[in-house]
Amino acid sequence: MRNIILGLIALVFLPAYMSGQEIKGKILDKEGLGVPGAIVAAASSNSSTDTDIDGNFSIKANVGEMIKISMIGFKTVSLKATASFMTVTLSESKDTQLDEVVIIGYGSRKKVDNTTSITSLKAEEVSQRKVLNASQAIQGKAAGVQVISSDVPGSSPSVVIRGLGTAIGGRSPLYVVDGMPTENINNINTNDITSYEILKDASALAIYGTRAANGVIIITTKQGKGDKVTVEVESFTGFRNPLKKVQMADSNAYARYTNAALGTATFSENQPVNTDWLDAVTRTGTYSQNNVSLSGSSENIKYFFSAGNYEEKAVLDGLNYSRFTFRNNNEYRISDKLKITQNLSFTSANSAPKPLDAFTSAYKQSPIVPVRFSNGSYGVSFVGSDGTAGTAGSSFNNVGNPVAQLDYTDEEQRSITLQGGLKLDYDISSSLKFTSQFNGEYYSWKKYNYEATQEIFNTYNNPGNLSTIVYPADKNINSLERGRDQYFNWNLSNYFTYNKLFGDIHDVEVTAGMETSVRGGRERMTVIRRDVNANSNYWSLTDVDYAGTVTSYKDDILNETKLASYFGRFQYKLLDRYLFTGTVRRDGSSNFAKDYRWGTFPAFGLGWVISKENFMADVKTINLLKLRGGWGKLGNQTVPLNNQSYTSGLSYYLGGSILNEGTTINSLIDPSLTWEVTEETTIGLDFELFDSKLKGSFDVYDKATTNVILYTKPYLTSGITDPTPAEVGEISNKGYEIALRWDDKISDNLSYWVGGNFSNNTNKLASLQNSNISPIRGGNLGNGQFTKQLDNSSVGQALGSFYVYEYAGIDAANGNMLYYNAAGEKVVQSELKEATDKKYVGSILPKSNYGVTLGVNYKNFDFSVDGYGTAGAKVYNGKKAQRFSGENVEASLTTDFWTATNTTASNPAPFNQVPVASTYYVESGDFFRVNNITLGYKLPLKEGFINYCRLYVNAINPFITQKFSGFSPELNGDSDPYGTQGIELNAYPTLRSIVIGANLKF
Amino acid sequence: MKKVYISLFALSTLFMASCSSDYLDVDATESIKTEDIELFNSNEGAATFTTAIYNKFLSFDMSAFSWVGLTSIASDDADKGSSPGDTGSDKDVLDALTFNSSSPSVAEIFTANYAGINRCNQAIDIIPQLDKADATVRARLVGEAKFLRAFMYFTLVKTYGGVPIIDHLPIQSSEDDRIMQLTRKSKEEVYAFIEKDLLEAAAVLPLKSSYSSTEVGRASQGAAYALLAKINLYQKNWQKVVDNCNLVTGYSLVSDYASMFKLAGENDAESIFEIQGTGSIPAKGIAGYSNVQGARGAGGWGWGFNTPSQSLLNAYEANDVRKNATIIFAGTTLYDGRVVPTTVENPRYNYKAYSSSYTDGWETDANIKYLRFAEVILMKAEALNELGQTADAVPLLNQIRTRAGLANTTAVSQTDLRAAIWKERRVEMAFEHDRYFDLVRTGQAAAAFTIHGKTFVTGKHEVFPIPQVFLEQTGGLSTQNPGY
């Protein structure tokens, strides 16, 4: 497979002591086409040049001198200069580390010369799995990178690189898209990505300083190449369904179970209705994407245009999402020395969200309730005297009608993201280059949300027009919320890169520069109005003053934040095999108090390419063996800020009717509060064996975040009630990663690969220096129960640990659920003491992640399979734990629950109280899933109008094995380990998709 | 090319220059930074810091459920009330005198008063810096803050004994300030601190009568002297009680006792200092105050806590007008015509917390009268009696009895008059948050609780426990009260 030509090139210049004549030649690829942009360097003459658009070059050198020709994607060639016209055919490089280049932040480096841990993924790996977000696509493909995704259209996955190092700070890695630091890449069309690099260790990350602690992902988008105009079209369409369903009780089983629970015969055990609510709220999802790109290059310009359209009708009824992307990347070679690169991306996304708690309602609502009653009104949970659901009777649960819930949600969101940048590269001399880059991002978002308040009230209170409940006259008939949100962020960096080989053995590259990054104040406005026109066209008429109908008006501008930075990197290579990298970044952040805003983040890396040593020359099986290691310090500046502000609204009447405004300060500040600091030490080994058929790497790391910020309780006597953020804790992440891949070509017609990666991480809250932590209570189930806690008792536990009571089985005498108290006695829930009886029972964070990949190319067919799994995580069956009397249960429960005649049942007697959070609902989150199967076929086309056509079928998430009894063990929730992450409540199911598509090139 | 090179260099130098220290100073837009004190540099701006202190008295934790629990339910004037099963989190143990240092009410009153004190310290610190406000206004506002700080320290010292004295805004990094916040001072030191604040307040506060109609409700000079007298009373400094009572001038007893606890009687001639609740929109009332004490059950409007005890009922002499002004009896009609049916859960409720216009509102127009001229008269009577001037004390007591529709006292001896004054205080000031402390002050507690059917442990129950949460924060710098 041919490597993609990158825009950035590692220059290698050699020392010179003389200059000679003009040597001319042409560089060709194996098809005989000229290779533009190849670097031709004469070692002794210290001269170099690039080939022109046709592959021609002309360089000053002496006949007989060694000329080195290098080009990304091709094997580097050294040969003697001849006076006659030189014709050199380059052979494409296989993906050996010797030739691969990785992006390292403010530059690039040959992978073999890199001392740090970077996983570099190429275009096909990012675009192969047909999902919206590139980070979801790479799940399982990079060792040490955990991706927790959700199939909610337009959602962003959580990415955790080498373990979670913060409790309440920002957790997201920094994305750098063509030089623009950003937080979200949902606006990037995966088809436009040429490389996706994950910087994993501190010595790679330190160049990003105070934003690097969660890792950095550098995304580079495509550039034009080749001397012909290439038009590429990719089109696919797919069908989606929930990967796994939970078998719920049917209406008669429900009636039996609930009657037993109530000890009555409220429900007829011969029900006329049997609603499958999950079916009622879902449909077969469909999605499709169409992309067209046009690219090419001429002598002075490389250009790339792409337009893409993604549309999804989600499995949840009514939930729709669409995204349109447009991109233009150009590179202008103004002169031999000056190059300007420009990129622009426009993304517009529209969505019609629907409430995900419809899934929980569908799980809980009784199957005896019809979707609609015979009179056309929505079914509600009223049971009549005949024991069936009807428009009149007594209400038997508080669950809404999931279908009505979806139908009554009338919401739309639209966003526009513009990202663009200008980059200027100027070769001051053959060794010194100056780069200046400006990038900006503009985001604008709007939404409306219309609620037919009165209609909803009538649905639930007045289903058969029989009820005497009348809608209160003073309540609003409907309400309309409109929201607006926008920001502009920009980034400017200027740096010099100096690269020189001294005395043939000392290869030095120095990068030094400055950067500023500004996140503009985010402007948000939300207005809620009541009693708007029922026709949405007439919501916003001109010349109408709506002040009288406004029930809420919020208009806020968040603080701007600025970062000013200096950075430098020194890379040294001795004898082509001893490597050293030293990095330092100094960041000043407006987030922190004046005297505490500057921080320095140093790092170093060492490498030894053992395979280049003489004593290894005879070891033919080892093509590459490199030992590397490093240490560095990183920051996380997205921590709770410590701004002290005036609190207003503390008013008081004086003089009878005069409301006086009051002001106070209700927060303490610790002005010394700054970024969280993570220190990491890492050692790694890269190897290629057996003619580079087997490639792999192994990494061990030890990461410690030493000043973890948590909230502390102010002294009672301070009079301050708001908790104060303080640097009080230490979080440790220790782990290892292995990646292996075997590639082999059996014949020209048959090649295959097998690969895999495994990573293990131990996360721990190592210590807390302050005994006065304000506890984080999280994982709220919405019924008064919380499932997670972080306080002084959490030391030694992993972050995101469940903190619940331990289930002790069923009391055979009465079917009650029993729990262990602190003394180890079995007690019922009313006897439990929260202060002493809860236990830590495992975390939502997996201990290991692994991925496997295999593929075969046979003649025109290509076939590949990717799998992903995690082990060691716990998940909480939240919707089951939230269940209450009168709500539906799993079918398996109705056949085996405690009764006076079945005292050894495996399930407790039906009960009618909110169950405490306990291990009864904590289940193993281990799973292995086949993420993707692709089968493709290239049509054997002769050179013609269509040069290339590949048809493919993808199966995304076709199979899963899981221990969890719920829908999906991959639960991103609100992506907060102390929020709903790892809890299945209002969770969108993981989907199985079947996709057919085609790639065409003209 | 040279030009490009030069201009690039210029660009980078420009950037370098812009990275000076100011570059990173960004303007706050999401909240008002404390550095922007200039926004408050006016008479109105300065006043907001003092207003915030008054506002603290409207909060639920400061003045409502817990405060009612400590001062009334725990005393012999009231029972827990409400439904037998509703503990009101800890009102059952307050009623039974079995509370401990983890009882939420005990922690809430501690925390709330220190929150108020923090607002006082802010006002005292910030207002003098506001040089565009009139000097006299600033002095008065600081005087109000000092009065209110003294008021809250008096609450703390009565409730917990000696407590940490926070006399300035603590600096987080200061070890001295940390120790200040965590170390209990003696009762005497706290009283000395209160007295100093009150003397400084009295020196600058205007008379109640000189406040304009738009300033009604602010602390006045009379309030400062009345509170000084009460502090002297608690320290048995009898001559000072008399002297300070004599400085409380311009007040008189109103003729109709019941009127004081209705809307029309707010800030009347007898009122020296009261907390102002307003029920009209936007409502700013004492959160939950009326509601938690409102009649419970069918025909009721509240939670039904703090019900007048049999012991209190027995304390009223026949024909005492104060009985029916203090107690709502089930099955009777209120002054506004509301009928309280017999279906309510408890036989009696607190009338002084009743709001006619906003009966079941969370924030109502009910005020709390903390200092009334009637108490000044009783304090003076008590002090004169203790000084041996019993004959001078008798007419003072009789003023109160006459207004209540009762005959003159029959007490003649110093001992009898002392008992008569103490009893008068009880019926005159029932449910005005005084009884528990008064029982302790006068040494009647053990006997009174025996009558009430509860056990008061002498040497323990004179004060409430220091909240356990706070003791844990002190790391040994402070110790618990005896017996807890």
Image (cartoon, coloured by chain):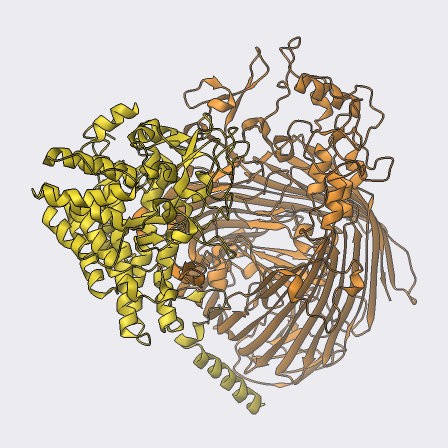
**Residue B472 in picture, x, y percent from top left:** 29, 39
- Name above or below for residue B145 compared with residue A907: below
Q: Quadrant of the N terminus of chain B?
A: bottom right
Residue A769 in view of the camera: no
From the viewer's perspective, tell me whether residue A436 is left or right of residue B212: right
Q: Quadrant of the C terminus of chain B?
A: top left
From the viewer's perspective, tell me whether residue A346 is left or right of residue B109: right
Query: For residue A11, what is the image quadrant?
Result: bottom right
Q: Residue at x 35, y 58 (%)?
A: B217
**Residue closer to the observer: B425 or A569:** B425
**Residue A930 in picture, x, y percent from top left:** 72, 40
Q: Residue at x 41, y 28 (%)?
A: A836
**Residue closer to the observer: A695 or A543:** A543
**Residue A212 in picture, x, y percent from top left:** 50, 59
Query: For residue A240, what is the image quadrant?
Result: top right
From the viewer's perspective, tell me whether residue A460 is left or right of residue B318: right
Toward the bottom, the furthest residue is B3
Q: Residue at x 64, y 38 (%)?
A: A985
Chain in yellow, by letter, is B
Q: Colour of chain A?
A: orange
Q: Residue at x 36, y 66 (%)?
A: B47
